[in-house]
Image: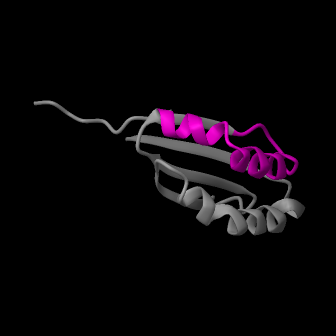
Amino acid sequence: MLVRIVRMEFRPDFVPTFLANFETNKNAIRHFQGCLHLELLQDADNPAIFTTYSHWQQAQDLDTYRHSELFKSVWAATKIGFAAKPIAFSLYPFIQVS
């Protein structure tokens, strides 16, 4: 499994547009092949900062999504509202071996 975290800061006036776009597309993203989980988190101190937290079956599934028409359309509608460069990274769950 791969965990993907994307932190995005928006212009405050753009937040309602972002939330509407997320609401419209969240089910399609959640049902994209390999997506196991998707949630949207809002920063506790700054209501214009959001983080997506998603789980993918494997890295290839995330790559396939990131090259899909769904991603391209969602990202195009999202990035126009950025107030700062987004921060994105992927992680593998840590498995401690004794």
User: Looking at this rendering, what residue extends furthest in the top direction?
Assistant: 97
On the picture, is 9 further left or further right than 32? Answer: right
**Residue 96 on image: x %, y %:** 20, 34
Question: What residue do we see at 76% from left, 46% from top?
Answer: 75
Q: Quadrant of residue 21?
A: bottom right
Question: What residue do we see at 52% from left, 42% from top?
Answer: 4
**Residue 30 on image: x %, y %:** 54, 59
**Residue 37 on image: x %, y %:** 46, 57
Residue 71 forms part of the magenta stretch: yes
- Asked if residue 87 is positioned above or below residue 9 in the image, the reply reads above
Residue 98 forms part of the magenta stretch: no
* On-image quarter of the N terminus: top left
Q: Is residue 29 visible?
A: yes
53 or 71, nearer to the observer: 71
Colour scheme in the image?
A: one colour
89 or 21, nearer to the observer: 21
- Asked if residue 83 is positioned above or below residue 91 in the image, the reply reads below
Question: What residue do we see at 54% from left, 39% from top?
Answer: 62
Q: Is residue 44 visible?
A: no
Number of callouts: 0
* On-image quarter of the C terminus: top left
What main secondary structure does the magenta stretch of the protein show?
A: helix
- Asked if residue 86 is positioned above or below residue 36 in the image, the reply reads above
User: Looking at this rendering, what residue extends furthest in the left direction?
Assistant: 98
- Specify start and end residues of the magenta stretch as a single range: 60-86
3 or 76, nearer to the observer: 76
**Residue 14 on image: x %, y %:** 86, 60
